[in-house]
Amino acid sequence: PYEKAKSLSADEPAAILLAENTTSGVELYQSCIGCHGAKGEGSIGPRLAGRDAEQMSANLKTYRAGGQVGPMSSIMIPAVKNLSDADIKTLVDHISQF
């Protein structure tokens, strides 16, 4: 369901890769806004802004594997089950900008 960012060769500027990851992060984050807010401020779900990127990534991978992280696991597990490792990195990179 999510379009993956295209791979760039080593000679293409990092700025292009960042722009593509940002765009993909924005797209991936659209389904998160309802619970986590437009800027990760939290609403129904917890605040994401300012959280540790490694921990967010680990949590998303746990959810993707069907594991429990907290009381909202039943919502998060199906929400992230189709994310690749690259998608998770892109999503966490986007959230880390909040």
Image (spheres, helix red, strand yellow):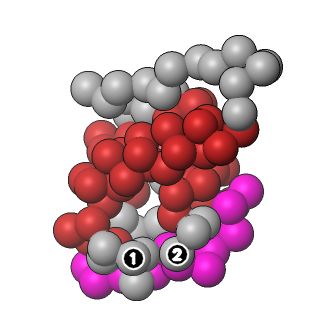
Name of the residue lying farthest toward the left: 34
Q: Quadrant of residue 53?
A: bottom right
In the displayed structure image, the side of residue 30 where residue 82 appears, left or right: right
Task: Identify residue type, mark 2.
Answer: Phe
From where the camera sits, is residue 28 visible? yes
Q: Quadrant of the N terminus?
A: top left
Which x, y percent locates residue 94?
52, 57
User: In the figure, 65 relative to 19: above or below?
Assistant: above
User: In the figure, 15 relative to 2: above or below?
Assistant: below
Residue 22 in magenta?
A: no
User: In the figure, 35 relative to 9: above or below?
Assistant: below
Secondary structure beneath label 1: loop
State how far apart marks 1 and 2 are (Cα). Answer: 6 Å
For disc 2, the neighbor class at 10 Å (few under 14, some 14 to 19, many from 20) is few
Residue visible at 42% across and 75% down in the picture: 40
Point out which mark residue 26 bears.
Answer: none
Are the residues tagged 1 and 2 within 8 Å (C-beta)? yes
Q: Which residue is mark 1?
A: 39
Q: Which residues are magenta?
A: 42-54
**Count of numbered circles in the view:** 2
